[in-house]
Image (cartoon, rainbow, N blue to C red):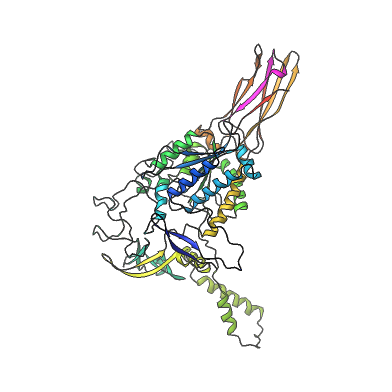
Amino acid sequence: MRSILFVPLLLALPSVAWATQDADPTDAAPVDTSRAPLLPHRELSEALARLASEHASNVQLLSLVRKSRAGRSIDALRITGAEHPSGQPAILLVANIDGPLVYTSGIALEHAQRLARGYGNDEAVTRLLDTTTVYIIARANPDAAEARFISPLAEVQATGHDVDNDRDGRLGEDGPSDVNGDGFVSVMRVPDPDGTWMPDPTDPRVQVEADPAKGERGLWKLVPEGRDSDGDEEASEDPPLDAIVNRNFAQDWKAHDASAGLFPSDEPEVRALYEFVLAHEDIQLVLVYGELGNLVERGKGVDDDAKPTKRVPPSGVRESDGAILDTIGERYREITGDTTKGSQDEAGTFQAWCYEQRGITTLNAALWSIPLDAEADSSEADSSEADTEEVGTTKPEQSEEETETDEEKKEEEKDDEPKPSDDAKRMIWIDLNSEDARHLGWTAFDHPELGPVEVGGFAPYALVEPPDEDRVRIADKQFEFLLSLDATVARVELADVRVTARGELLEVEAVLVNEGLLPLVTTWGKKTRTTLPARVEIHLPAGATLLAGSKRVLVSDLRGSGGRHELRWLVSGATAASIGISVVTRHAGGARAEVK
């Protein structure tokens, strides 16, 4: 099997990347791991600008108005077909809004490149872009992402304001650091009689919380690697930054939580995303590559008519919207094969804001995590059992009762065996795939303030970043799913437009149809009133009179999958050929028909 190693890269700053060893010649053709690359901010920005320059006819580079706290720009691409009429449905893809998921930026860049280069050359790409605008924000959290390319290597979530976590009157004086000089900021196991952690009985390389009710006793407390700079006998308890971008959005914002920021939208990236979504009313569907997931397993749902509590509507996907989300999720799993459930904690996130406050259908794809279903290799145990039997001997026959008793004993013994924790299951996958560098082991270290400790555990990014080959495979499958979304977005059309003579009058009829899966306005969008309805208008010649029906009709209740809304007018003083009907939307296309 291929092994994955941490290999230093000679970039502008020291960095670390997962690199795959040379492929075994007996293996299948090696994957081009240069695709969907891990890029620091400057190189990613240059790649986006270069793509827009090379495909100026259908790719536009948009820089969001606000920059990050460190002054890094947040760039978006607008990718369209040859024609892009006003109101054409749009899909917004957002990647790397969660700082450590840097690899998702490379996947988003890969999508943009394949869309730009495939237009006019690939049937599926051309079909999508001729009917749908695609916006791609490849890196929504540039400051946190940049930590992936700095040594010593540490996973960074927070980029915003500091909080005095230890209440000593000083800010950020006691953050994580590389105390043993191995190039990684990992975890310390600190011996403590009041500690709550003990070795996992199935794998001492990882730990589990001790359960006193079972007679278990903790040996350590776990703390981020670092010094006790303020002399309070606690290490790494007051990091220099606390606020996390994707916890700073207004929906279900958690007050008095350091990670949520000082107030909603305090982080500049949050305001930038607010402004982008508000300025682009054509966005009908949002797809986010991040920690959250609702395509493999849907999160909390609430009834469509759920009552507010203290005038605050309950959070969660409305059941009618959730039923559609289930259909999309089924298609997603079929196309991608993804089984990663992702987090369900949406408090203060961009995804929750998009749905709860803008009424936009939001798809959350958690692209990868270390599988927990890897099976430990039992071939050695099986062979050792076989070796204990003498060659040429035959086991004595057993009665059915004896066989059943033996089976019951085996089941009881199996039930009594300790079950591996999730971390122990991750170690099984690491061992089977020779991904040894994902776990640093535990090394004794004489800490300057805490005394003897052990430093190690999972390496930074080891639990969230897939191997190179998996990253490329994920990019291919996710792109296939992205192309399938052209049949998901709502699209309005005029059908069955006809006129019938009623004496000297004309009866005009038309049907507004939505062939997409999504409704014209989501259930929650009707409540928030943030999505404008379709406007249907009848156009009459001078001198004609509208006797029945409204000149302009607003339609918001138009379900997907062939939903219909019938319209009728009665007109005098006009000929059929002089009458026209139009439909206009901000986000689901439009149409115009002449009466025949």
Q: Residue furthest top?
A: 543
Work out which quarter of the rendered image holds the N terminus and state it.
Answer: bottom right
Residue 30: which quarter of the image? Answer: bottom right
Q: Position of residue 164 (x, y in %)?
A: 28, 50
User: Residue at point 54% right, 63% down?
Assistant: 373
Position of 150 with respect to 58 (left or right) is left
Identify whether 384 is placed above or below 371: below
At which x and y percent is residue 50?
Answer: 50, 44
Horizontally, residue 367 falls left or right of residue 575, namely left
Query: Range of the magenta residues?
Result: 569-586
Q: Position of residue 372 (x, y in %)?
A: 52, 62
Image coords of residue 522 (percent x, y): 56, 37
570 inside magenta stretch = yes
Q: Is residue 137 visible?
A: no
- Quadrant for the C terminus, please: top right
The quadrant in which residue 457 appears is bottom left
Q: Is residue 31 shown above or below 501?
A: below
